[in-house]
Amino acid sequence: MPIRQPIVCVLGHVDAGKTSLLDELRKTNVQFREAGGMTQHIGASFFPVETLKQLIGPYMGSFKTGIEIPGLLIVDTPGHEAFTNLRRRGGSVADIAILVVNAIKGFEAQTFECIEILKVRKTPFIVAVNQIDRIPGWKAQSNAPFLKSYASQASFIQEELNNRLYQVMGDFSRLGFKTDRFDHIRDFTQNIALVPTSAKTGEGLSELVMVLVGLTQQFLKKRLQTTDGPAKGAILEVKEEPGLGLTLNAIIYDGTLHKDDMVVVGGRDGPLSARIRTILVPKPLDEMRDPRDKFTSVECVYASAGIKIVASDLDGALAGAPLLAVPENEEVEKYCGLITEEIGKIRITKEIDGVIVKADTLGSLEAMAEILKANNVQVRSADIGDISKRDVIEASVVKQREPLVGAILAFGVKTLPDAEIEAETNGIKIFNDPIIYNLIDNYIEWVKEKRERKSEAEFEALTKPGKIMVLPNCIFRRAKPLVAGVEIQGGRLKPKVSLIRAEDSSDLGEIQQIQDKGKAIGEAKAGAQVAISMDKPISGRHIFERDILFVKVPEKDAQTLLTSHMEDLTSEEQEVLKEYVNLMRKKIPFWAGTT
């Protein structure tokens, strides 16, 4: 079976240098025509085998059988989108990925997001540790292989680079990945390759392409086999083009697509079918988003290919949705059913207490749902489109039962005006962030804060343990009220708490007031000597000098302290609580039992 070119995804933090890296490979200047120097739309570039041979250059000898793949299709992704739209049943459209990490800054917010999504999609990847030219003192050698450039650097600069690589390796290790510099790896199935690069000077790019080609040829041959049948693909972007109308940017990962083919794609309100009017492809080494030359119209394309499709009746097509070509003499309905089934796995509606998730594309929606699942967050509904009043009402229903999941997580969508009013009225929190990882992180942090506040309020309301001794020669009034001097031996003492006598567990009633040097105080802590007044006990009958007394902690409070708030008590308060519990259990076995 013929082997197609691997689909390679480039992803990483917003300014790690992804597009610059591709620009240097393509010798184009896409980045400077992007708004604010950031990639705004997903695009793809085809690198033919001749270009790969030029790029690999000095390392061609390491390929005994030569380059067997017909080229590379490299997909450049916006920093805020990762490669979520490159989705297909059972994983990712991307065969392999290049994760770009900044050599100076190391791991950043979107680095974690990208790794999370790579893990979810089970996509193999290599790491370009980029911007090595910014290491202080680095003497750049334009377009040189990394190993040649590294050998010419002073030893202290080599050491500085190695330290930065060790830092990246440590970050990966904490996430459960083994990594090493590419030339130190013996087994690429056990270690992920780190390739130091500079998009600015071109250093290390020959090794990056060499490792990429080597890994795809060695490990991905079976995956790269294509069928002769109708095309299968994924929609990257839905775009209105002047003179063309609505177009679909898509990646075809299997089969063949012909002009006039009937295709079925995922739509906002169900599957859409249409006959293809035009297939447009960019020139080799050009790029779908912003080609230097006009697109070329072709009669057919074979996998893998990045294409622009022009067809009528595709309003409402969803980015991230599957695209299937319908073979001649087969029912369109059958393929509509396959699309419905696939999209139904991502769009969630369950009668459970969970968060509401809204996203702009199916890919983003799926990524959010997967990351939430990994963080044990329940999802009640996950769907495409702006936040509606109905979404807010759903969240309100959940909030009444479970306040911490009565929230909406929104990525790349707007909140409709009536939904905003409804959210404000019902106090529904809407989380928005241009980075999925941050969005979910913010929600988890909010839940943690809410739990802590609730926990603090609960702790404040509990009766805390306290142990006191009645001081000798300090009973100033025998009764109605009894006034005595006491020393707090552990824990704390407050007015309105009841006391019990340790010797016989008898209940002495409430403390009315605590005074220190003649002034009423709200609390006395361990070590303090204070006077207390009590209405119920009588000195010489209920209470005696040198008596040990305990704060009467209700059983329910003691149980809550033992199970949920031991870490909120000081070690000395913990000891007093244990003493008090043991005292109570002499009378009532299993008192304040935690089971």
Image (cartoon, grey):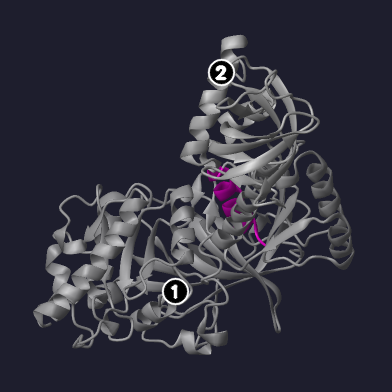
Residue 379: image quadrant is top right
Badge 1 amino acid: Ser
Badge 2 amino acid: Leu
**Nearest the camera: 463 or 556?**
463
Q: Position of residue 201 (x, y in %)?
A: 28, 86
Residue 365 in magenta stretch: yes
Residue 476 in magenta stretch: no
Q: Main secondary structure of the magenta part?
A: helix
Circle 1 sits in a helix, a strand or a loop, which is it? strand
**Nearest the camera: 401 or 416?**
401
- Report crowding for label 1: few under 14, some 14 to 19, many 20 or more residues within 10 A (C-alpha): many
Left-right relation of 372 to 225: right
Residue 199: image quadrant is bottom left
Provide the residue designation for mark 1. 45
State the residue at coordinates (73%, 37%).
533
Q: Is residue 480 above or below residue 571?
A: above
Q: Which residues are magenta?
A: 360-375
**Nearest the camera: 426 or 110?**
426
Q: Position of residue 483 (x, y in %)?
A: 71, 36
Left-right relation of 109 to 149: right
Q: Which quarter of the rendering shows the C terminus?
A: top right
- Report crowding for label 2: few under 14, some 14 to 19, many 20 or more residues within 10 A (C-alpha): some
Closer to the N terminus: mark 1 or mark 2? 1
Residues under numbered marks 1 and 2 in contact, where contact means CB atoms less than 8 Å apart: no
State the residue at coordinates (56%, 11%).
586
**Nearest the camera: 464 or 430?**
464
Circle 2 sits in a helix, a strand or a loop, which is it? helix
Q: Position of residue 183 (x, y in %)?
A: 16, 63
Q: Is residue 216 above or below residue 46?
A: above
Provide the residue designation for mark 2. 583
**Distance from label 1 to label 2 (Cα)?**
77 Å
